[in-house]
Amino acid sequence: MASLFSTTYASLSYGGPAASRPRRRMVAVRAEAINPDIRKTEEKVVDSVLLPEISKPVTAYCRCWRSGTFPLCDGSHLKHNKATGDNVGPLLLKQK
Amino acid sequence: MASLFSTTYASLSYGGPAASRPRRRMVAVRAEAINPDIRKTEEKVVDSVLLPEISKPVTAYCRCWRSGTFPLCDGSHLKHNKATGDNVGPLLLKQK
């Protein structure tokens, strides 16, 4: 199984002073599955949102595959990000 | 860093005939980052969709963190699923 590896670092030394560029956070991401447990009997987990049925001003949908209320977000990305150094977050559907 | 490991198997021998239960696909998922490259300078990647601006009958949003058109889906989950045995797919927003 192929792997992509990189390590945490603060800056590289090309292209001007480091302070002028945003710090790029690098994290190790292997070529492995990202969904540990959600609907694993399904060949592909696809969810559909019928937009006329969205009534709340903001509805958050999970993209971290750790939510206990999937496909809705339950904030589990916070624990995942803290544990792994990742930076994933939800998709917000807004009425206006 | 904590790891969760499991291996691919076809069935277990408890709870009645295997044929009566859907086959549960197990894949190795480590406690690692799932976003290899998208907007890594951001503390948390959150996207907002203003629903009045959605005009197409179906719009697919990426949940595999591999799309070249993130936050939109470009079908990259197919390659990811094939390479890793995962089963992730997009979130579809439908007008009706």
Image: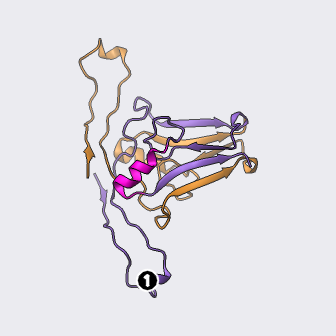
Chain colours: A purple, B orange
The amino acid pointed to by label 1 is: Ala
Q: Nearer the viewer, residue B66 or B79?
A: B66
Crowding at label 1, few (<14), some or many (≥20) Cα neighbours within 10 Å? few
Question: Which residue is rendered at x = 65% and y = 46% of the image?
Answer: A93
Question: Which residue is rendered at x = 32% and y = 39% of the image?
Answer: B27
Describe residue A39's horizontal placement relative to residue B53 as left or right. Answer: left
Q: Quadrant of residue A49?
A: top right
Q: Is residue A77 magenta?
A: yes
Q: Nearer the viewer, residue A48 or B57?
A: A48
- Which structural element holds mark 1? helix
Q: How many marks?
A: 1
Question: Which residue is rendered at x = 37% and y = 58% of the image?
Answer: A85
- Relative to B16, residue A76 above or below: below
Majority secondary structure of the magenta segment? helix
- Relative to A36, residue A4 above or below: below
- Relative to A28, residue A46 above or below: above
Q: Nearer the viewer, residue B40 or B25?
A: B40
Give the chain of mark 1. Answer: A
Residue identifier under label 1: A18
| Residue B73 horizontal/vertical position (percent) | 56, 50
| Residue A16 horizontal/vertical position (percent) | 46, 88
Q: Which residues are magenta?
A: A75-86
| Residue A87 horizontal/vertical position (percent) | 45, 57
Q: Is residue A6 magenta?
A: no
Q: Quadrant of residue A7?
A: bottom left
Question: Which residue is rendered at x = 45% and y = 87% of the image?
Answer: A17
Describe residue A32's horizontal placement relative to residue B38 as left or right. Answer: left
| Residue A23 horizontal/vertical position (percent) | 44, 73
Work out which residue is located at the far top of the displayed protein and give it.
B16
